[in-house]
Amino acid sequence: MITISDLPTVNATLNTISAIFLTTGFFMIRRRKTVAHRNCMIAAFVVSGLFLTSYLIYHYHAGSTPFEGSGWIHTIYFAVLIPHIILAALILPLALITLYFALRKQFIKHRRIARWTLPIWLYVSVTGIIVYWMLYHL
């Protein structure tokens, strides 16, 4: 059974899976495999939704986790964390708009915003894993 204390690891795993789907989806569209691209991106969206739900549940019950590191690693932690938080706030509306245009088959608009959404979403997923690692494994 999963407990509240397991959720940070679950969240990091979900971020990893999301990053894999995003990357695979990108390579699928570059190869013009649109069905595979669509499936990967929907899967990334669903997994990210599960992450967000798990993240909110964890922080509702556990509060915030202070970073215990000091010195230069403390500076690196905040250099990763601050843009992660800012971009994480932007990614949900960007992802929703990008998905909306794709589902409406407005592919010119979809492509235009996806060029911004994908790198931001990947950045947030990967830095989420880094923040987890720094908080729980340093």
Image (tube, rainbow, N blue to C red):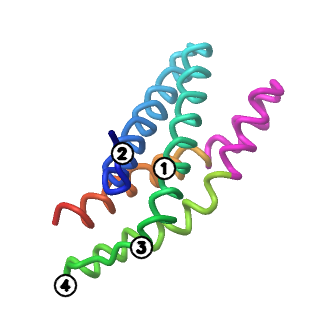
Counting from the top left corner in percent of width and height, residue 137 is at 18, 61
Q: Quadrant of residue 72?
A: bottom left
Q: Earlier in the sequence, mark 1 or mark 4?
A: 1
The answer to whether the residues at label 3 and label 1 have Cβ atoms under 8 Å apart is: no
Q: Nearer the viewer, mark 4 or mark 2?
A: 2
Magenta segment boundaries in residue numbering = 93-116
Tag 4: amino acid: Ser
Question: Who's the residue at 53% across and 34% down the image?
Answer: 44
Tag 2: amino acid: Val
The answer to whether the residues at label 1 and label 2 have Cβ atoms under 8 Å apart is: yes
Q: Nearer the viewer, mark 3 or mark 4?
A: 3
> Real-space Cα distance between discs 3 and 1?
14 Å
Residue under label 4, please give it.
70
User: Dominant secondary structure of the magenta stretch?
Assistant: helix
Q: Secondary structure at mark 4?
A: loop
* Magenta-drawn stretch contains 49: no
Residue under label 2, please give it.
10
